[in-house]
Image: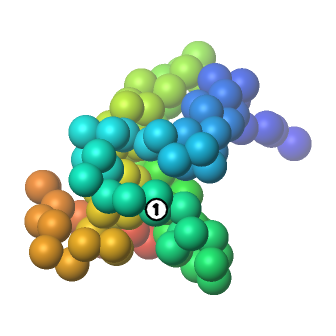
Amino acid sequence: MQQIPEGVRGAIRFFAFFVGNGTLDQDVLSDVDDYRPALFKFGSALEKVFAVYTNVLEYDEAGMPTNDDWAAHRAAQWIRSYLDHDYEVEPPFEDWEVELH
């Protein structure tokens, strides 16, 4: 059985840390009060945040993430759009980015 590459596991762990302590992509979320209660209340929003991050995350042949910042940025955009219906995601999400598997 193959495991997710170590570099990818590390990227997911750091992403979870930033989501959990409220410091994910401050360029996108600086105008949002603490987003954590809204995500953690029912869990399905938090599930979507991780789905966006892992759907967008790519890694190379060595198992090292190649676009971790972009994946985290897209997840932050999803959070912002979830909390602020006037926020316009640029570029708009594609179906594969927000799909739950």
Q: Where is residue 66 in the image (x, y as percent from the top left)?
A: 42, 25
Q: Which residue lies furthest to the bottom in this view?
A: 42
Look at 55% across and 21% down and name the residue there. Answer: 64
Name the residue rendered at 56%, 69% in the picture.
Answer: 37
Q: Which of 59 and 33 is in front in this view?
A: 33
- Whether residue 28 is visible to the viewer of this picture, yes or no, is yes
User: In the image, is residue 39 above or below residue 68?
Assistant: below
In which quarter of the view is residue 82 placed?
Answer: bottom left
The three-letter amino acid code for the residue at tag 1 is Tyr
Give above or below for 64 relative to 48.
above
Q: Along the line of sight, which residue is nearer the eye, 8 or 46?
A: 46
Number of marks in the image? 1
Residue at x 39% of width, y 68% of height: 98
Residue in front for this viewpoint, 78 or 86: 86
Render colour scheme: rainbow
Residue identified by numbered label 1: 35
